[in-house]
Image (cartoon, helix red, strand yellow):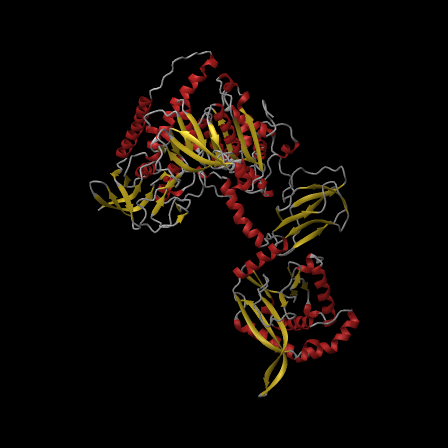
């Protein structure tokens, strides 16, 4: 039986990053993946959606190009080639991961790992069963799409994020159940492709995890682009007819029926506990319970990523994987990481830290400054002056508690806010930093100076 | 002619005095007998009164400065009299103020720079004016900077190097928090990259110090408490103590006190207490056992001619030992008056240096408490101390019969370097006999 310092179950952004960090730190590493390397993020999540969103963005720009006196006619879309490009992108990145595993001498097992308390891992594949023994195990099994038990769900033409990125035909009508990040990004893709998109959300607002103002701003923009929202609406039944599919939901006490070609189910994800059933570890609700070092109740077993809940984001999982390895190497993780989160809609939303509501709940003396990007020079020149930037700080030391950005390219700009928080710069330090002009990024400076009552273009 | 104010020598062992406070500012007028400053010696802290009348022209030392005895610490004189800018040395010479060419850097004509470097003798650091300015600007304490110049003089570059080496890495947020709580950054453990202090570190520091500061009051050891602490530590650490105890039948002392009480009270207005009788008996016995009345100073045993009894007096936040000079020569009435007066003066911090020094043997009486015996610590350079317990009625065997007698335990600690067990035991036995037959002290 082959022996390893660390066995990592799951080859997504939590698992493979941990594997590389562990190997680079001198540990012997086994990485076990039953499906595809790169996990949900690379194969069925972040990367395919961002690839198709680029297509959608160009289509949207073409549609809006007459405002720039550019007139484009007879635009046609080749969906099959788009999907092929998406697959090429995935394969290129997957080959990259494979190369890194080889380069770092990580033993890659193709098969599903079943873990025992003592660190024994049984790898089951179609061909064989193999056992390995590891001093430490990192569980990085990720999550699965959750499909709620709604009547008729099995009969209708239903897609999830696992299948939608391989769709063969552009539907005329799409009903998306769930107005979270995944639902909204896919809504933007199909809206640009010309599909009529309806979003049915159970909560009283879209993006319930994001800043309220950001969600409201995005909803208005998406409505302007032709997407229809049904908020505070409870889906009760799906029905398949000969010609189409029906989504039946209740809103304001009324029953409403939407007719559609396809349905996308995007109400959330559930931790994937396959292979860890035999472990005597503690759970926190559906998630594996861990401490700041990602250690489970079994000291030799660690867990990272979607399996432990939290943000369920690729970069969060990677950071957790690195923390787990750090702890295996004998270093204590004392601090919580600051995890930014991005929504790649049109416009984008990017945030880090507390929302205004969360900051108040946490007992801070909250002061908020929001500045609109409507007057930003670079934004106006690029016809992208829709959005805002908002600083949420504690009045006492002007500690930056959170930053919310809405607008074009904000996912590329949130890291400067994260940097301030990570290095514990306060609002004064943002204000005293020089930002290049003209940029959208100047919005953060304007927000900081306005916060301090020293605004140049804003008050 | 302006008169020097000297650091007084208040005891035979005093070498330096620590300035605790000035009661007068430069320019204030001073009367004879007015308290001028307060100092702490190895024994006690004391207010020093002015011997002169006039204007306090100059103060050369600040609070907490340690000043050798007989150093000029200031001047009193007429308003417009000239006095030296720096403290004259002990030989009476005025130290040279360094000439300007010594300074590598020219600085703005700020009068405070003119004082330039001060000598080590006065406890100050040698530094150029430029170094001092840079140190002030950078919050650097010069005493920590090692000087590269002649005689260790600190130059500007030394301060800059020091400031650079000792720069504390701290995030802006953590710095704001630390400033807000007036924290000493050097006390905070930074856990960030290269030991950078972050918010969590400050919070951890505050949390750990909050817990203790809320639960327990912390008082810095200073003034009288510090003097006692130093003295007790020195005594306990350097003197091999041996403590002997014996029990004394106090029947006769009680009787004699009962008879003398009205007489002494009428004569002095004070009530005779057992303490005075014990002082008298002790002084009387010490005359016969000079070894117990000796002082050990360096490597000499000094057999004191006078019997000066130190009487430990509890005062607020401490203990003072005024000295009853020639206790053996004083009658009980006089002893009562002196010991009561000294006790009051001790509690009111009004003892003169003479009254506080010169004791050759100390008595510590805890008889007013439920204490029988204890192990008193010797008050150096003395070589013995007597601890007095309560008078307690006890069954004792007298002539094969159990009788109830008022008994009192005496505890004698002695310095085994100077005295051996046998002579100490002889003394204590003699003292016991004296107290049990107290008429001998009256004759």
Q: Position of residue B302 (x, y in %)?
A: 59, 63
Q: Is residue A328 visible?
A: yes
* Quarter where residue A2 is shown: top left
Q: Check the image and report above or below for A256 versus B290.
A: above
Q: Hey, which residue is sitting farthest front in the picture? A: A242
Q: Position of residue A38 (x, y in %)?
A: 32, 34
Pick the front one: A166 or B19: A166
Q: In the picture provided, is B282 more to the left or to the right than A320?
A: right
Q: Hey, which residue is sitting farthest right in the picture? A: B266
* Quarter where residue B101 is shown: top right
Q: Is residue A425 visible?
A: no
* Quarter where residue A321 is shown: top left
Q: Position of residue A150 (x, y in %)?
A: 40, 40
Q: Position of residue B248 (x, y in %)?
A: 61, 77
Q: Residue at x 70, y 38 (%)?
A: B83
Q: Check the image and report above or below for A71 versus A299.
A: above
Q: Residue at x 54, y 36 (%)?
A: A356
Pick the front one: B316 or A28: A28
Pick the front one: A459 or B434: A459
């Amino acid at each position: 039986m082959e022996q390893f310092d660390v066995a990592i179950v799951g080859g997504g952004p939590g698992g493979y990053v941990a594997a590389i960090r562990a190997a680079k730190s001198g540990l012997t590493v086994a990485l076990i993946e039953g499906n595809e390397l790169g996990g949900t993020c690379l194969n069925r999540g972040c990367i395919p959606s961002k690839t198709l969103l680029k297509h959608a963005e160009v289509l949207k720009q073409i549609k809006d190009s007459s405002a720039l006196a550019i007139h484009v006619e007879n635009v046609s879309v080749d969906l099959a080639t788009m999907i092929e490009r998406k697959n090429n992108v995935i394969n290129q990145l997957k080959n990259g991961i494979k190369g890194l595993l080889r380069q770092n001498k990580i033993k890659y097992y193709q098969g599903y790992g079943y873990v025992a308390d003592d660190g024994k891992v049984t790898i089951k594949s179609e061909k064989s069963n193999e056992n390995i023994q590891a001093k430490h195990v990192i569980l990085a099994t990720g999550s699965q799409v959750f499909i709620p038990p709604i009547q008729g769900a099995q009969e209708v033409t239903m897609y999830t994020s696992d299948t939608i990125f391989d769709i063969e035909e552009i539907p005329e009508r799409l009903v998306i159940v769930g107005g979270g990040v995944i639902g909204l990004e896919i809504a933007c893709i199909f809206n640009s492709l010309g599909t009529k998109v309806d979003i049915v959300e159970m909560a009283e607002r879209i993006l319930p995890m994001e800043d309220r103002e950001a969600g409201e701003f995005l909803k208005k923009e998406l409505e302007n682009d032709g997407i229809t929202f049904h908020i505070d609406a409870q889906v009760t039944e799906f029905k398949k007819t000969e010609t189409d599919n029906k989504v039946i939901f209740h809103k304001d006490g009324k029953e409403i029926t939407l007719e559609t070609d396809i349905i996308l189910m995007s109400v959330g994800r559930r931790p994937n506990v396959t292979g860890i059933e035999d472990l005597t570890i503690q759970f926190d609700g559906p998630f594996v319970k861990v401490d700041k070092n990602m250690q489970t109740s079994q000291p030799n077993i660690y867990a990272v990523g979607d399996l432990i809940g939290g943000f369920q984001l690729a970069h969060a999982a990677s950071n957790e994987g690195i923390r787990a390895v750090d702890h295996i190497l004998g270093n204590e993780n004392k601090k919580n990481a600051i995890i930014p989160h991005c929504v790649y809609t049109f416009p984008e939303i990017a945030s880090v830290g507390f929302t205004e509501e969360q900051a108040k709940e946490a007992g801070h003396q909250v002061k908020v400054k929001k500045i609109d990007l409507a007057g930003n020079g670079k934004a106006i020149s690029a016809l992208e002056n829709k959005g805002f930037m908002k600083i949420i700080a504690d009045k006492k030391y002007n500690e930056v508690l959170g930053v919310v950005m809405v607008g074009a390219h904000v996912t590329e700009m949130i890291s400067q806010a994260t940097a301030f928080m990570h290095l514990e710069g306060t609002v004064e330090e943002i204000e005293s930093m020089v930002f290049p002009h003209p940029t959208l990024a100047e919005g953060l400076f304007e927000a900081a100076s306005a916060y301090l009552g020293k605004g140049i273009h804003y008050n | 002619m302006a008169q020097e104010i000297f650091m007084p020598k208040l005891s035979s062992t005093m070498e330096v005095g620590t300035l605790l406070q000035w009661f007068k500012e430069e320019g204030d007028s001073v009367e004879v007998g007015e308290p001028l400053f307060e100092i702490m010696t190895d024994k006690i802290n004391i207010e020093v009164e002015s011997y002169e009348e006039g204007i306090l022209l100059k103060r050369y030392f600040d609070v907490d400065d340690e000043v050798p005895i007989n150093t000029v610490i200031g001047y009193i004189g007429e308003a417009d009299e000239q006095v030296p800018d720096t403290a004259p040395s002990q030989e009476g010479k005025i130290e040279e103020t360094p000439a300007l060419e010594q300074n590598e850097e020219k600085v703005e004509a700020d009068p405070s720079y003119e004082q330039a470097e001060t000598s080590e003798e006065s406890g100050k650091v040698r530094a150029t004016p430029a170094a001092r300015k840079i140190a002030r600007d950078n919050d650097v304490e010069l005493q920590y900077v090692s000087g590269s110049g002649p005689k260790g003089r600190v130059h500007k570059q030394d301060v800059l190097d020091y400031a650079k080496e000792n720069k504390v890495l701290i995030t802006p947020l953590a710095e704001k928090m630390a400033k807000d709580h007036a924290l000493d950054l050097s006390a905070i453990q930074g856990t960030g990259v290269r030991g950078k202090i972050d918010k969590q570190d400050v919070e951890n520091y505050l949390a750990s110090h909050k817990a203790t500061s809320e639960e327990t009051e912390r008082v810095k050891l200073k003034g009288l408490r510090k003097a006692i602490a130093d003295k007790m530590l020195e005594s306990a650490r350097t003197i091999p103590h041996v403590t002997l105890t014996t029990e004394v039948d106090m029947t006769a002392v009680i009787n004699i006190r009962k008879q003398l009480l009205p007489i002494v009270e009428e004569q002095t207005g004070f009530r005779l207490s057992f303490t005075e009788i014990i002082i008298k008996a002790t002084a009387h016995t010490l005359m016969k056992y000079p070894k117990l009345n000796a002082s050990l100073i360096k490597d000499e045993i000094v057999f004191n001619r006078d019997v000066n009894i130190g009487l430990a007096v509890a005062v607020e936040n401490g203990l003072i030992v005024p000295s009853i000079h020639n206790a053996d020569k004083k009658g009980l009435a006089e002893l009562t008056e002196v010991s009561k007066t000294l006790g009051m003066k001790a509690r009111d911090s009004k003892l003169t240096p003479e009254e506080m020094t010169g004791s050759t043997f100390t008595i510590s009486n805890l008889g007013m408490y439920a204490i029988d015996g204890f192990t008193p610590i010797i008050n150096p350079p003395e070589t013995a101390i007597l601890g007095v317990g309560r008078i307690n009625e006890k069954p004792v065997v007298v002539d094969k019969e159990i009788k109830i007698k008022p008994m009192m335990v005496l505890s004698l600690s002695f310095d085994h370097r100077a005295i051996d067990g046998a002579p100490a035991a002889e003394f204590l036995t003699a003292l016991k006999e004296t107290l049990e037959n107290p008429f001998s002290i009256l004759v």
